[in-house]
Image (spheres, helix red, strand yellow):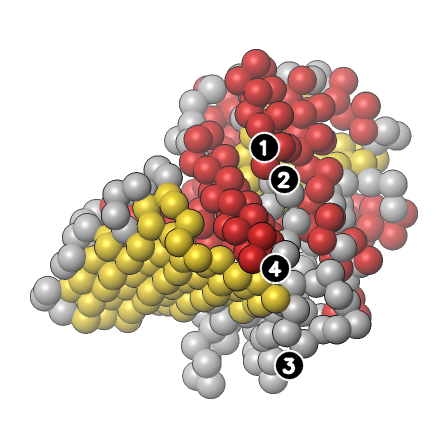
Amino acid sequence: MSNKVNHKDGATYAPVGQSVKVVEPNQFYFSVAFLDHGHIFGQTNGLLQAGATLKYVFEPDAKKLAAFCEKYPGVQVADSFEQILQDEQTQLVASAAIPNVRAQIGIQVMQAGKDYFTDKSPFTTLEQLAEVKQVQQQTKRIYAVYYAERLHNEAAWRAGELIAEGKIGKVIQVINLAPHRLAKENRPAWFFEKASYGGILTDIGSHQVEQFLTYSGASDASINFARVRNANNADKPELEDFGEASMTGDNGCSFYTRVDWFTPQGQATWGDGRSFIVGTEGTIEIRKYMDVAREAPVSKIFLVTQESESEIDCYGQSHFPYFGQLILDCINRTEFAMKQAHTFKAAELSMLAQKVADEALV
């Protein structure tokens, strides 16, 4: 498996962590299907580094399949998706399909008695969420989502630990800024079809809402404001290149996020993701991918408490615990990696914000 990480292209960005294995070889098997988004490499890396064994891959597109097999030469090519669903060894199926079909794939996986690990966004409509919730309750399988901006980023993960340790007191506001590089010429056709990707708040916004729920401790929120637009891509009329939303958590914590496709070409990384977290006893700023004009790539926290201020370098300092926790959850039928209700709520709130924004356009 190649350890080269492309920091310029967010679509293929796949972090590599220190190896902390929670299972022995051949103790936990997963298979991969539908490689429409490059995040599948990050999902696969995380599971492999936590000790999981990769068995099958299924992908109808020969070019995508060849690239995956080149990166993971030990994988077996399945003749059909059904072969994976029927395989008794496969315990988890990881997938990065086109967003509007992710829910239906997950339903098939759960009904086959396996756990599911999909790229975000896990749904494009509230109707898909309702159907998946019903099947998840019936099957008791795990419907996990790769909310990578926290789960696969060292500083974003560490910030959650610092907050849980009480370093900044009670969180009262979270602000997430999430610019991305468009790289229009490299994107597939579905990327520009709103029915396929669900809208910018549904898509990129789901990352941001998941972080808000984690950092604030809120279990639900109300939408105060949401807006989307196509500001500079008239040739792709269904693309939303800018979005913003405001929410108030059920615990009173406020949240604002801006998501966009305007990372300049001169920037060293695919995005300058930042989080600003205000607590009653301190503040945290997260610089997830770069420190503009100073250093890139980086993963840093700037922590201010009642006692001191400090810069914490997190880059390369994490083994990305989520993946090992997910594997153990699949084995032990627990939910330490992420509670199922939290997984669904992050997607639900992002889609509700998208709905508010869409209705404002009518």
Q: Tell me, for residue 125, which label it has, or none.
A: 2
Q: Is residue 122 left or right of residue 197?
A: left
Q: Is residue 205 left or right of residue 118?
A: left
**As drawn, which residue projects farthest toward the front?**
362
Residue topped by disc 4? 361
Marks 4 and 2 close (CB-CB < 8 Å):
no
The answer to whether 134 is drawn above or below residue 251 in the figure is above
Question: Considering only order in the chain, which callout, 2 or 4, is on the residue closer to the N terminus?
Answer: 2
Front: mark 3 or 2? 2
Q: Tell me, for residue 129, which label it has, or none.
A: 1
Question: Considering only order in the chain, which callout, 3 or 4, is on the residue closer to the N terminus?
Answer: 3
Asked which secondary structure carries label 3, the reply is loop
x and y percentages locating residue 168 in the rendered image: 19, 56
Question: Considering only order in the chain, which callout, 2 or 3, is on the residue closer to the N terminus?
Answer: 2
x and y percentages locating residue 151 in the rendered image: 47, 48
Asked which secondary structure carries label 1, the reply is helix
Q: How much space separates mark 1 and mark 4, taking CA atoms?
A: 23 Å
Categorize mark 3 by other alpha carbons within 10 Å: few (<14), some (14-19), many (20+): few
Residue topped by disc 3? 265
